[in-house]
Image (spheres, grey):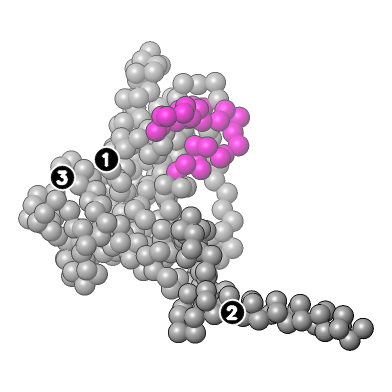
Amino acid sequence: MEEKFSRLIFIPIAAVIFLMIGYQYVCPADSNTCRFRSDEKGLVQQRLPAFDSLYSEPEADEDFPAKITSKFNFTERDLDRHVDFNIRGDDVMVFLHIQKTGGTTFGRHLVKNIQLEQPCDCMPGQRKCTCHRPGKAESWLFSRFSTGWSCGLHADWTELTSCVPHTTDKTDIRRGPDKRQRQQVDLNTQGGNQQGRQDRNRNFYYITMLRDPVSRYLSEWKHVQRGATWKTALHMCDGRPPTQDELPACYSGEDWTGVPLTDFMNCPSNLANNRQCFECSPGGENILHVAQ
């Protein structure tokens, strides 16, 4: 009986000793191979590189591990605004896409994820979607994913307000010349609301996406650091692009790859500086008040 009991005790003791020896072999005392904290990757990920994707953060978070949290106080009036957008009439929604604000994602939502009587037609492999009004061959949306960069790459407020009505009119003339030739166009840009005074009033509703200024600035810096330039942007004002003296380049090579943050900040002509205010206003000294 005692011999049988000794055998039963020996088996679990031997198993424990075997596991301890195996653990010391896999995880030496002076090694960081094994980690058990929840915020670290651990042995499995180090042994299997395929698990790296499970731990990778989105691009914006990779740039800056410490997330910047901001609190914004909006009034009820700011959050609950009703706009009488007449998609069946002549109203046009214009999306002002500011760099590094999430505009690409939002722009795709505009053409793919809005419940409409006549949804946008997005063909596989095509960058642009056709967003026609119900029963008409006219577009109600002016954006990167519907009309393309028709007014220039990342056109700002000044460029859009001077370009969109003219571009929209030309498009409508091609689609329906008889109707459009009978209409007298008088563009009224006062107060930021443009109207094509035709047989029916045309309203242009400008929308945009904003982001915490510091987060957006740092995101643009990292994007430029990786080689982005936006060289094809027109920066049109008063019917012409800026001269080299008016907008000097911040770098001399093909791009600004690897630029340190201090150099990025110290360039006086860097359009990343206060970009959201500049792109949402016609310029001038008090751009923040005008942009608001």
Q: Of marks 1 and 3, which one's residue comes earlier in the chain?
A: 1
Disc count in the image?
A: 3
Q: Which structural element holds mark 3? A: loop
Q: Of marks 2 and 1, which one's residue comes earlier in the chain?
A: 2
111 and 263: which is toward the camera? 263
Picture disc at residue 21: 2
The stretch of residues the image draws in magenta is 107-133
**Quick check: 118 left or right of 181?**
right
Q: Residue sitting at 53 percent across and 33 percent down?
A: 87
Extreme-bottom residue of the structure: 2
Q: Which structural element holds mark 2? A: helix
Which mark is nearer the camera, 2 or 1?
2
Q: Is residue 251 above or below residue 116?
A: below
189 and 96: which is toward the camera? 96
| Image quarter of residue 245 | bottom left
Q: Is residue 61 magenta?
A: no
Q: Position of residue 83 (x, y in %)?
A: 54, 46
Q: What secondary structure do most residues of the magenta stretch adopt?
A: loop
Cα distance in 3D space between marks 1 and 3: 11 Å
Visible in this render: residue 278?
Answer: no
Cα distance in 3D space between marks 2 and 1: 67 Å
Q: Amino acid at mark 1?
A: Gly
**Quick check: 136 left or right of 218?**
right
Picture disc at residue 241: 3
Q: Which structural element holds mark 1? A: loop
Q: Is the residue marked by circle 2 packed among few (<14), some (14-19), or many (20+) residues within 10 Å?
A: few
Q: Amino acid at mark 3?
A: Pro
Q: Quadrant of the C terminus?
A: bottom left
**Quick check: 276 left or right of 239?**
right
Q: Is residue 116 above or below residue 280?
A: above
Residue named by callout 1: 152
